[in-house]
Image (cartoon, rainbow, N blue to C red):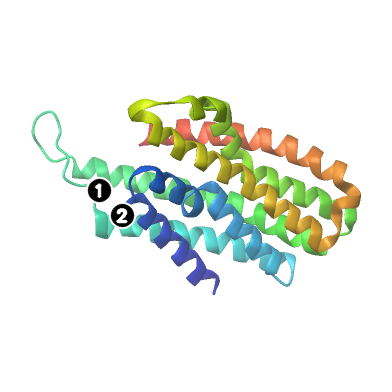
Amino acid sequence: MIVLTGAVLGLLAFVGDAVDGAAGQVMIAVVSSGLAWGAAALLAGHAAPDGRSAVRGATVLLASATLVYYAMILVISRRWSGGTLADGSSADWYGLRSLAVMTTAWLLVSVVAGPSLGLMGQMARTARLPRAALAAGVACGLLSGEGWLHVAIAPPWRLWEVDGPDAAFARGALATELVQVMVPLAVLAWLASARRLWRAWHLMVAALAITATLSALLWHLLRVAANHLG
C-alpha cells in the first residue's frame, strides 16, 4: 500500500507538470510540492503501528514517488531529449546526466525527510503531551516552509495588486501561497484536535515558528542547488 501510494503521488506530480496556467500552479502545490509529499509521509508515519514502521513507510513512500516521477520523465515526456549543443550535436547525454543527478538528489532528500516526517507523525499520535505537541508543531513547520519562502519572495498583497497581462499568473501564485500555508495549519489543527494538544499550544507555536524558518531556509538552499545542478 505504501509503494502504491508513492506511485500514485509520483503519477499525479507528473500529470501536474502538464497543466498550464493558474490551474497548473495550484495543482503543483497540491500534488507536486514539498507540502504534498511531506504531508503524505507525515500521514504514513501517523498511521504506522510503531516508530520503525513509521520511518520505513514514510521513506519508502517518498522514494517510490521520486522514482515513478522521474521514470515517467525518462520514458514518457522525454523532456531531457531533443536539445542541441552550440556545435549542432545532440545534447541528450547532458539531459540524461541532469535527470540522473536530480533523481539522486531527491532520493537523498527522501532518505533524510522520510524518517523525520514519519517519526513526527508517529510521535504526534503516541507520545505524551509535551513531546506530541512539539512533534505536531515541528511537522507543521516542515510542511509550511516552502510556502513561507514563497510569501517572503512575493508577499500576497503585492500579488493581489498585479494587473494587466500578468494578473492571471499572479492570482495563481497567490492561490498557491495560500494552499502551502493554510494546509499545514489545517494539518496541525487536526493533529491537535485528535490528541487534545491545545493544552500545550505554546510549545506547538514555538516549534512551528522555529521549524518553519529553518525549513524555508533549507528550501531556498535546495532551489539554489537544484538550479546549479540542473
In the rendered structure, are the residues bearing label 2 and label 1 in contact, judged by CB atoms less than 8 Å apart?
Answer: yes
Q: For this view, does 61 lie left or right of residue 27?
A: right
Residue 164, numbered label? none
> CA gap, disc 2 to disc 1?
7 Å
Q: Position of residue 60 (x, y in %)?
A: 54, 63
Residue shown at the point (60%, 31%) measured from the top left? 217
Residue at (45, 66) in percent of width and height: 8
Q: Position of residue 141 (x, y in %)?
A: 69, 43
In this picture, is 43 found above or below 146? Answer: below
- Which residue appears at 74% of the width and 41% of the height? 208
Residue on which disc 1 sits? 79
The kind of residue tagged 1 is Arg
Q: Which quadrant holds residue 10?
A: bottom left
User: Is residue 189 shown above or below 91?
Assistant: below
* Residue 143 percent coordinates (x, y): 62, 47
Q: Residue furthest left?
A: 88
Q: Which mark is residue 73?
A: 2
User: Dot 2 lies on which element?
Assistant: helix
The amino acid beneath tag 2 is Ile
Residue beneath the point at 55% across and 36% down: 219
Measured from the top left, where is residue 18 in percent x and y?
Answer: 32, 52
> Which quarter of the rendered picture does the N terminus lie within?
bottom right
The reply, left or right, for residue 137 in relation to residue 53 is right
